[in-house]
Amino acid sequence: MAKLNIVFIASEASPLAKTGGLADVAGSLPHALQHLGHQVTVILPFYRRHLITNKIKSTPLNNSIEMWADGVQRHCPLHETFVNNLRFILIEQDDLYDREGLYGPTGGAYEDNLLRYMLFDRVALEAASRLKEKVDIIHCHDWQTGMIPLLLQTQYQHHAGIARAKTVYTIHNLAYQGNFPPEWIHRLGIPSHHFHPADFEFHGQINCMKAGIASAHAITTVSPSYAEEILTPEYGCELDGFLQHHTGKLFGIVNGLDIEAWNPASDKALIANYKAGSTAGKKKCKAAIQLEFGLEVSTNTPLMVLISRLAEQKGIDLLLANAQRWIDRGYQLAVLGSGDPHSEQALHQIADANSKQMHFWRGFNENLARRIYAGGDIFLMPSRFEPCGLGQLMAMRYGTVPVVRATGGLKDTVIDHGHSKSTATGVHFTDATPEAFDDAVEYAIGLYRNSTIWSRMRSNALKRDSSWEASAADYAKLYEQLLKA
């Protein structure tokens, strides 16, 4: 395979700035591609306060880009930083990017988000065109970079460094499409002749995700099942008909995990380390998290854990409908997350009334999450839809058996005990109802009571290859196919 020069353009990437799974992909997949021998550069906004918080040091480049946007000529300095030999180019514009939230205040969105990311997209293309080697692939992610394939075709096709680049557009979550009023078209110089239903017009508004779908050379989703699901009215978020016209370039490639960063055999956040074939440390981790959360320290009591945004998509209502009955049956429950205020309040009420059996920690803390993954017996993920999901991968990596709804990446990554008893890593349920979720939990509890079966499932989960290696190879193959076309 020939060495390719690949540029990732994304709105977030770990460990520089993160709100969700997009950051994990944009931060990990490039490393895996470099391990295959390719050259990868990641271009991000310069989120000054997030870089400081995450202790990322950068160096100003002797290079800046002038860019007009919304009637203002902007001077955009470039910075660079390296994380494990992966180069990041960062675009500075403090009034737009040095804010508390990446996309908006808690629970909201900034009104100038289209200005913020259209400027970023244009400057990123200019920066890519100035790289020493000509770019083969420009890989874009979610609505924030959806306009890039269109801009490359219409306004940047004469930039020699990127003129021949093929574009890949990854949909991480179709629900977030980037819809904005049409007056931005002329304010930002967006190609107006593409504002029609077959391109980026959507109910009279600009739709950035439609632009990416229409103009990219290839579209990927973060699991094969999600690629099929978004073609249906149930999961298509009103774009299923539009996507049907682009199925010839639609591919599903499941996400991976940074298995060095998420490794129970070496994780310093854990009280004891363990691995497949040597799991005594996991029992110590369970006792430690029970003690930390004020739960009864018990080896035999099943400890069910959930780490999630508290949102309807994540099926939190299904958890709330069942939590008290599980507690009444003698099970323990630990929840880490934040989001919907009503869900937070309900979880606090149940936990406060049953403090010896349930603990709710509002917010997110990565070290605590690691201790929960390690200490839990059963990981709950009742998502209504899940493009890929990383929680179930992390849970299996730590030998905690997932109970998941059979949708999207959950269906693709967790092997259901009901379908394959010898290779099972978890339990599926189909209907998004409290009853179906409860039935699946009871099925899992029955397996938990059989030490032989449970040991095998836990071992299968611990041994599962969740690395980026296979997925990176699939992406590299797709890149090669595009360049040969």
Image: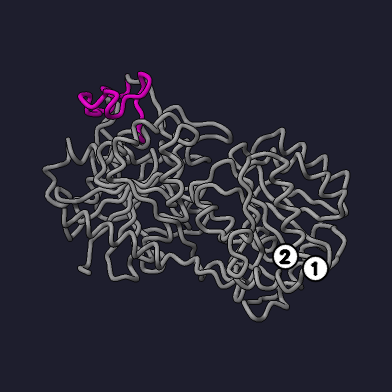
First of labels 2, 1 by sequence position: 1
In reply to whether residue 450 is colored magenta, the answer given is no
Secondary structure of residue under mark 1: helix
Residue closest to the eye, 63 or 281:
281
Q: Is residue 409 above or below residue 142?
A: below
- State the residue at coordinates (47%, 67%): 467
Residue 393 is drawn in which quadrant? bottom right
Q: Position of residue 223 (x, y in %)?
A: 44, 52
Residue 19 visible (yes or no): no
Label 1: how many Cα within 10 Å (few below 14, some 14–19, many 20+): some
Instruction: Indicate the colouring scheme.
Output: one colour
The kind of residue on which mark 2 rests is Gly
Label 2: how many Cα within 10 Å (few below 14, some 14–19, many 20+): many
Residue 425 is drawn in which quadrant? bottom right
**Residue lying furthest bottom:** 278
Residue closest to the eye, 387 or 14:
387
Q: Position of residue 442 (x, y in %)?
A: 76, 53
- State the residue at coordinates (76%, 72%): 451
Question: Magenta segment range?
Answer: 183-209
Task: State which quarter of the image contains the N terminus.
Answer: bottom left
Q: Judge from the rendering whether residue 453 lies leftward or rightward of residue 478; answer left or right.
A: right
Q: Position of residue 50 (x, y in %)?
A: 50, 49
Q: Position of residue 30 (x, y in %)?
A: 36, 61
Residue 153 image label: none
Check if mark 2's residue and mark 1's residue have beta carbons within 8 Å: yes
The kind of residue on which mark 1 rests is Ala
In reply to whether residue 207 is colored magenta, the answer given is yes
Residue 375 image label: 2
- State the residue at coordinates (26%, 43%): 216
Residue 174 visible (yes or no): yes
What residue is shown with label 1?
287
